[in-house]
Image (cartoon, rainbow, N blue to C red):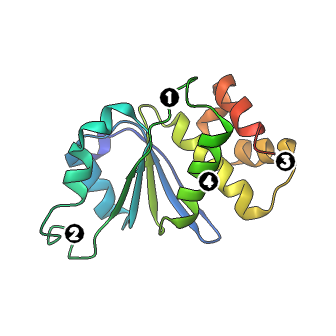
Amino acid sequence: SVDAMPMKLVVKQGATQAVLLGKQTPQEAQSVAREHHVRSWLSLDASDADGAVRDALCPGDAEADGGKGIEYVYERLNVPDDLTREKRERLAAIMEKLPAPVAISCATGARASAVLGMHLAREEGIAREEDAIAMARERSLDFLAKPPLVSWVKGGF
């Protein structure tokens, strides 16, 4: 059921509207996309490499979602191997291009919240890591409980 689905947070700030999620089945992903009128989906979880969530969100006939289409991007973010400056910049560029509302998913929601936290900080023009972490704390972003993700986010300031 939709109620049992691991949903972390819905954020609306400026031009950004995002839904942070833990691991989703294809059916849960479809439900979230409908409920939140998702226009794009960023998956960070290696288990999504099989394309099942993408196929559920982006059917070949495009009629399941009213013909609007959902832009789906898979960009693996493994901890700690992918916590690099290059990956941070790549994800920042992806987030800038994705139409809102965007759903961001990973296994638990922590990596998704780190990507969103960096995006929101950039959108707000935050230049100091202390201010970025304070903003993330105000929004209860899960990555704050994961030291490697905190360090990675701080490295962007």
Label 2 sits on a secondary structure element that is loop
Q: Which residue is mark 1?
A: 78
Q: Inspect the image, locate mark 3, and give the three-letter code of the amino acid beneath it.
A: Asp
Residue 112: where, in percent of width, then height? 52, 42
Residue 51 relative to residue 71: left or right: left
User: Residue at coordinates 67% horizontally, 49% vertically from top-left?
Assistant: 118
Checking the image for residue 92, the label placed there is 4
Residue 38 relative to residue 29: left or right: right
Q: Which residue is mark 2?
A: 65
Q: Residues within 10 Å of mark 2 (few under 14, many from 20)?
A: some
Position of residue 122 relative to residue 46, above or below, is below
Residue 107 relative to residue 156: left or right: left
Q: Which residue is mark 3?
A: 131
Q: Residues within 10 Å of mark 4 (few under 14, many from 20)?
A: some
Q: Earlier in the sequence, mark 2 or mark 1?
A: 2
Q: Inspect the image, locate mark 2, and give the three-letter code of the amino acid beneath it.
A: Asp
Residue 114: where, in percent of width, then height? 61, 41
Q: How many marks?
A: 4
Q: Earlier in the sequence, mark 4 or mark 2?
A: 2
Residue 46: where, in percent of width, then height? 37, 32
User: Residue at coordinates 20% horizontally, 47% vertically from top-left?
Assistant: 27
Q: Earlier in the sequence, mark 1 or mark 3?
A: 1
User: Residue at coordinates 61% horizontally, 53% vertically from top-left?
Assistant: 92
Q: Inspect the image, locate mark 1, and give the three-letter code of the amino acid beneath it.
A: Asn
- Cα gap from disc 4 to disc 2, whole angstroms: 27 Å
- Cα gap from disc 4 to disc 3, whole angstroms: 18 Å
